[in-house]
Image (tube, grey):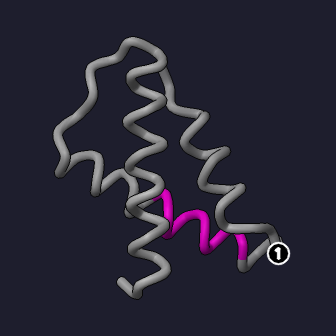
Amino acid sequence: MGFIKEQQKRLAIRFLSWQYEKRNLPVPSRIELERHAAGIVEDAHRIARERGRNVMSIIKEMVADIKR
């Protein structure tokens, strides 16, 4: 992963952790969070290419949609 994507992944990890804590759900292990965040970042970049939207706003929306 490049520098920008790595930074986006770190931000996605923080967003994911925050969402889990906010909803009183057990926070997954760091490895699981990293895998999930990497998938979110890749999906966000794909969506941004297809629809021309901002990657960070897509990441925020995807993290906010965590199922309970």
In which quadrant is the N terminus drawn?
bottom left
Question: Between 50 and 8, which is closer to the camera in this rendering?
Answer: 8
Q: Residue at x 49, y 80 (%)?
A: 4
User: Which residue is tagged 1?
Assistant: 52
Q: Residue at x 62, y 73 (%)?
A: 46
Task: Give coordinates of residue 48: x percent, y percent.
Answer: 72, 72
* Magenta stretch holds residue 60: no
Q: Is residue 23 above or below residue 52?
A: above
Question: Between 36 and 11, which is closer to the camera in this rendering?
Answer: 11
Q: Residue at x 60, y 55 (%)?
A: 59
Task: Give coordinates of residue 33: x percent, y percent.
Answer: 29, 47
Residue 33 in the figure: left or right of residue 58: left
Residue 49 in the figure: left or right of residue 34: right
Q: What are the residue bounds of the magenta stretch?
A: 40-48
Question: Between 60 and 50, which is closer to the camera in this rendering?
Answer: 60
Disc 1 marks a residue whose amino acid type is: Gly
* Magenta stretch holds residue 46: yes
